[in-house]
Image: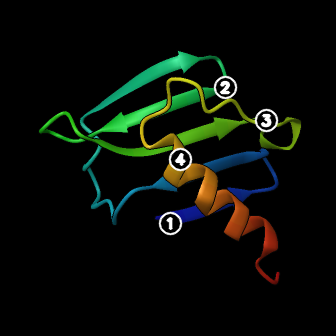
Amino acid sequence: MIVRYDSEVDALYISFRVIEPGGAKRTRMLDDRRMVDYDAADQPIGVEFLCFSEGIDLEDVPRAEEIATALRAFATAPA
């Protein structure tokens, strides 16, 4: 998993693999703060969380347990 945080817009993106340009074929809005990107085979390839500093909700998010693990590692990684 690749975790990227943009502090200017307070958004976190987690990709499940390297995503080539144009790789996301569809985006599903779970709500106004959570979006899931899917590839051409309709497999989830990434998740975006807006307003990240306010916390995130992993309910209904694909691969939620893996994301939680990645976020714990991200939070403890040296800057």
**Image height check: is 74 above or below 54?**
below
In the picture of the structure, the residue carrying the numbered disc 1 is 2
Residue drawn at 25 percent across, 50 percent down:
23
* Disc 3 to disc 2, C-alpha distance: 7 Å
Name the spot of residue 73 as percent of width and height, x first: 68, 70
Question: Marks 4/3: CA distance?
Answer: 20 Å
Sequence-earlier tag: 2 or 1: 1
- Residue, far bottom: 78
- Where is residue 17 drawn, in percent x and y? 34, 63
Local packing at callout 4 (Cα closer than 10 Å; few below 14, some 14-19, many 20+) is few
Spatial separation of the CA atoms under disc 3 and disc 1: 19 Å
Pointer 1 local density, CA inside 10 Å: few below 14, some 14–19, many at least 20: few
Name the residue tied to disc 4.
65
Q: Residue at label 2?
A: 33
Q: Which residue is mark 3?
A: 51
Label 3 SS: loop
SS state under label 4? helix
**Residue at image x 77%, y 45%?**
9
Number of disc labels: 4
Q: Is residue 25 left or right of residue 35?
A: left
**Amino acid at dot 2:** Arg
Could you tell which of marks 3 and 2 lies nearer the N-terminus? 2
Closer to us: mark 4 or mark 3? 4
- 53 relative position to 27: left or right: right
**Which element is circle 1 on?**
strand
